[in-house]
Amino acid sequence: MPPLRGERVSKGIALANFDSRSTSDGFVRLPLEDLRIVSWSHLLSALDDGLRLDTRRLEVQRRISGFTEWHSETMSGPLSLGWDWLLEASTSGDIACARAGLPRTNLMLTGRDGMDIGWYQNLETLAWVIDQLPWEKVMLCQIQARQAGR
């Protein structure tokens, strides 16, 4: 089972039951049942480049988009998990963040039989993992720090 919201998200761990292998197709394979013990760390978040140009021309930007990348160091090599996001400000000033679409990754999950679970199921499972991470707050902090440093 994947990590739950509020569980610790930290850098690299040694996975005791980690029996994956990096292959010539570029994927690092991981048994589905071991996904819960992978710790994800924020690597970077940024606004889409096209948006930066639009933002200069508009006084009020109510909807922005960007991307974020998270990683995990494992004994089999680095795992990468990235996705696009949307941030929308309501007229009352509330901010809502949402993952936009399916993630990008070098991780392929395998079933109990050791076979890949399939690309679509893999991405849907990793999307669920993303939705459990506290990524919105981490991403917002980095975006605000970058904008303040301009």
Image (cartoon, grey):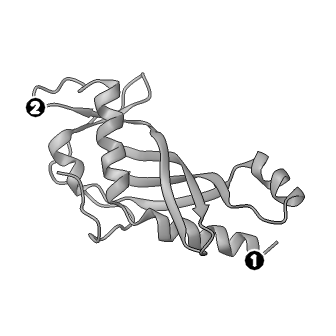
Residue at the image position 20 percent from the left and 46 percent from the top: 18
Residue 74 in sight: no
In the rendered view, tell whether residue 42 sits above or below residue 116: below
Residue located 34% across and 27% down the image = 120
Which residue is label 1 attached to?
148
In the picture, measured across the screen, residue 137 lies left or right of residue 7, that is right
Question: Please, what secondary structure does the residue beneath circle 2 have?
Answer: loop
Whether residue 112 is visible: yes
Q: Amino acid at mark 2?
A: Arg
Asked if marks 2 and 1 touch (Cβ < 8 Å), the reply is: no
Relative horizontal placement of residue 56, taking residue 44 as reference (left or right): right
90 and 48: which is toward the camera: 90
Q: Residue furthest left?
A: 112
Residue that sits furthest to the right in the current view? 57
How many numbered marks have been drawn onto this rendered protein structure? 2
Figure check: 28 above or below 131: above
Name the element at disc 1: helix
Q: Which mark is residue 33?
A: none
Q: Would residue 114 appear left or right of 45 to someone viewing this image?
A: left
Q: Nearer the viewer, residue 111 or 137?
A: 137
Q: Percent x, y for residue 62?
A: 68, 61
Residue 118's spot in the image, x, y percent?
28, 24
Q: Nearer the viewer, residue 53 or 112?
A: 53
Q: Residues within 10 Å of mark 2 (few under 14, many from 20)?
A: few
Q: Position of residue 71 (x, y in %)?
A: 44, 53
Instruction: Tell me what residue is drawn at x 51 percent, y 60 percent.
Output: 97
Query: Which badge, 2 or 1, is on the more N-terminal residue?
Result: 2
> Residue at label 2?
112
Residue located 81% across and 58% down the image: 55
Identify which amino acid the numbered label 1 is placed on: Ala
Quarter placement of the C terminus: bottom right
